Structure formats: structure tokens, C-alpha cells
Image (cartoon, helix red, strand yellow):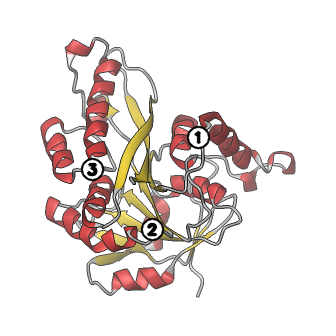
């Protein structure tokens, strides 16, 4: 029986074509197209994964284009989507019960065969459709994926990554590593970077960088450099030392463990960094967005 996960954040976090008049029915499609063209990146068949933000498109849509604009959809038939859980606590990873993910610009069917394969390991829980629809971290990647893979037969494997301890990050990374070695698989990892300000209970400030927003940038770029090394232990150490509020820390860690345990040599490179606003005083707040491509390293 078909189980549809609605595009529950359409019309608020991003444009919903369905709510618009026929004259602007292509607005979301046009927005994504414009941002991808502005990023002006060549489509590369060696790009096997991305790390991209998941805020509302008015904040992070342009930055996200620097991840999704790299993708050559030609030989990809399956997308693993890893996103953090913002509202639902689980110490595990959870799989969707849906059979299709809707987006305003095209629906993405779930790969039920792989879902069953992962369920059979006994390591995953299932998330209720209500939990699935409440979570935005994976949904914010869907319109971009629907756009980039338009006209291609592609299925998705959504994995909600819970509050994993270090052992579980490594375990899921080992379990999923075999999928990296299949070149028809792609990986979309969802994360924003530093959430700074009193409302996020995080106000790390190193005065040597001058303005607060420069200190935030230095902290984020330190983390991005560590991620680029591909070393999940170094990333864990960085997080323990600085406690940077990277909300997709667990999906990123699982991905790093996947790359460590697979046979294919893949290198992560960050291509874009932005902040929602520039913090100058302690009354200000911002969220950072970073986009990366994970590319086969010949």
C-alpha cells in the first residue's frame, strides 16, 4: 500500500508550486535553476555525495546550490539521504515507513528493497510518518534532488540519524560502507553549521579574529578542514574541544566512517560558506551554511 510523505514544509520553508497561481507555478523550479546557474559548477560524474544545509531556502538555498550543482545524474539510480533528528529522540538510526516522498517539483520513490535489507540488520528503528513529516533536515534536500535528477529513474533511502554515541557512529558507518562501493549510489548528507547566539545557548568568541562573525567563520572553517581530512576521530575531537553547534554532526560522522570503511577512495571538499547574518554584538544570532562535494579521488 502506498504511504506518502507529504512535502510538509512546502509553502513555508520553501516555495510550494501548488499554492501559487498558474502564472507562477514554476517558481520553485526557477529558483533552484537560478541558484544552480549562479554557482556555475561543472557536473562531475566523480561526485558521489554532498554535504549541504537544510535551512529555509531564503537563508540557505543559494549556498546549497554549490553542493547540488556538482551532481551528474547520469549513472546514479539510488540516493541515500542522511539527516539529523531535530524533534524526535532516538539513540539509533531510523528508517522511513513511507513508499514515496512528495516534492512540489516531482515525487521521489523510496527504495523499499534496500529499506528491507537495512531493517533485516536489526540495527534500525522505524519512524512514524508523523515524525518523518515533522523533520525538515531531509525534506530540504528533496526539491534540489528532484530538480537535479529530473528525468532519471532514481530511488531514495532516507535515514534519520539520531543522537548516536561514537561506537554507534562507527557501527552504522561500517554497515553502510558497502553501498559507497556501488557507483550507482549517491549520498546526500544534511547539516547546518554553527548556530550562534543566546537563543542557541552557544556564544563561543575568540577575540583574536576581531568581529564575532569572523570568530564564528574561523571556528566553522576549522571544522570544515577537519571534515576534509576524512578522519571521523579528528572530527569527534574537534567537537569535544569546541562544542560547535553543527546540527548534522552525527550524519557527517557516520558518512566519514562510511568513507573510512569502503574500498573507494573519496575526498570531501567544501565549496561554499555563508552565514545567515553577521553577528557584531552578543545580542545578535546567526546560523552558518557550508556546502561540500564528496568526489572519487583517483
Examine the rendered structure and indicate whether residue 57 appears above or below residue 110.
above
Q: Nearer the viewer, mark 3 or mark 2?
A: 3
Examine the rendered structure and indicate whether residue 68 appears above or below residue 287.
below
Residue 167 locus on image (x, y percent)? 14, 64
Q: Are marks 1 and 3 in contact (CB under 8 Å)?
A: no
The residue that mark 1 highlights is 41
Question: How far apart in space, not on screen, are marks 2 and 1 (Cα)?
Answer: 26 Å
120 sits left or right of 157 in the view: left
The residue that mark 2 highlights is 158
Q: Quadrant of residue 155?
A: bottom right
Mark 2, other Cα within 10 Å: few <14 / some 14–19 / many ≥20: many
Q: Residue furthest front?
A: 298
Q: Secondary structure at mark 2?
A: strand
The residue that mark 3 highlights is 230
Q: Are marks 3 and 2 in contact (CB under 8 Å)?
A: no
Examine the rendered structure and indicate whether residue 14 appears above or below residue 186.
above
Q: Quadrant of residue 200?
A: top left
Q: Nearer the viewer, mark 2 or mark 1?
A: 1
Q: Residue at x 32, y 53 (%)?
A: 252
Q: Residue at x 21, y 14 (%)?
A: 207
Q: Residue at x 38, y 53 (%)?
A: 297
Which quadrant would the C terminus be assigned to in this image?
bottom left
* Closer to us: 144 or 45: 45
Amino acid at each position: 500500500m502506498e504511504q506518502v510523505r507529504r512535502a510538509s514544509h512546502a509553502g513555508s520553508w520553501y516555495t510550494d508550486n501548488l499554492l501559487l497561481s498558474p502564472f507562477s507555478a514554476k517558481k520553485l523550479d526557477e529558483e533552484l535553476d537560478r541558484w544552480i546557474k549562479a554557482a556555475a559548477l561543472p557536473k562531475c560524474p566523480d561526485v558521489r555525495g554532498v554535504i549541504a544545509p537544510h535551512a529555509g531556502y531564503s537563508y540557505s538555498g543559494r549556498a546549497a546550490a554549490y553542493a547540488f550543482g556538482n551532481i551528474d545524474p547520469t549513472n546514479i539510480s539510488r540516493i541515500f539521504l542522511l539527516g539529523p533528528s531535530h524533534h524526535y529522540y532516538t539513540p539509533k538510526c531510523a528508517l522511513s515507513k513511507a513508499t514515496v516522498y512528495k516534492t512540489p517539483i516531482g515525487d521521489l520513490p523510496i527504495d523499499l528493497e534496500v529499506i528491507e535489507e537495512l531493517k533485516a540488520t536489526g540495527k534500525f528503528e522505524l519512524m512514524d510518518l508523523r515524525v518523518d513529516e515533522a523533520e525538515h533536515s531531509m525534506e530540504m534536500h528533496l526539491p534540489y534532488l528532484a530538480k537535479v535528477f529530473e528525468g532519471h529513474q532514481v530511488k531514495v533511502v532516507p535515514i534519520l540519524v539520531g543522537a548516536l554515541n561514537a561506537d554507534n557512529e562507527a557501527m552504522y558507518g561500517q554497515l553502510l560502507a558497502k553501498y559507497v562501493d556501488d557507483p550507482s549510489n549517491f549520498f546526500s548528507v544534511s547539516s547546518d553549521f554553527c548556530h550562534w547566539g543566546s537563543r542557541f545557548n552557544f556564544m563561543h568568541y575568540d577575540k583574536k579574529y576581531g568581529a564575532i562573525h569572523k570568530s564564528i567563520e574561523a571556528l566553522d572553517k576549522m571544522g570544515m578542514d577537519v571534515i576534509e581530512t576524512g578522519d571521523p576521530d579528528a572530527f569527534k575531537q574537534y567537537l569535544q574541544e569546541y562544542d560547535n553547534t553543527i546540527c548534522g554532526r552525527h550524519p557527517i560522522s557516520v558518512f566519514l566512517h562510511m568513507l573510512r570503511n569502503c574500498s573507494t577512495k573519496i575526498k570531501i571538499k567544501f565549496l561554499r560558506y555563508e552565514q545567515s547574518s553577521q553577528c557584531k554584538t552578543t545580542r545578535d544570532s546567526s546560523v552558518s551554511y557550508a556546502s561540500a562535494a564528496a568526489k572519487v579521488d583517483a
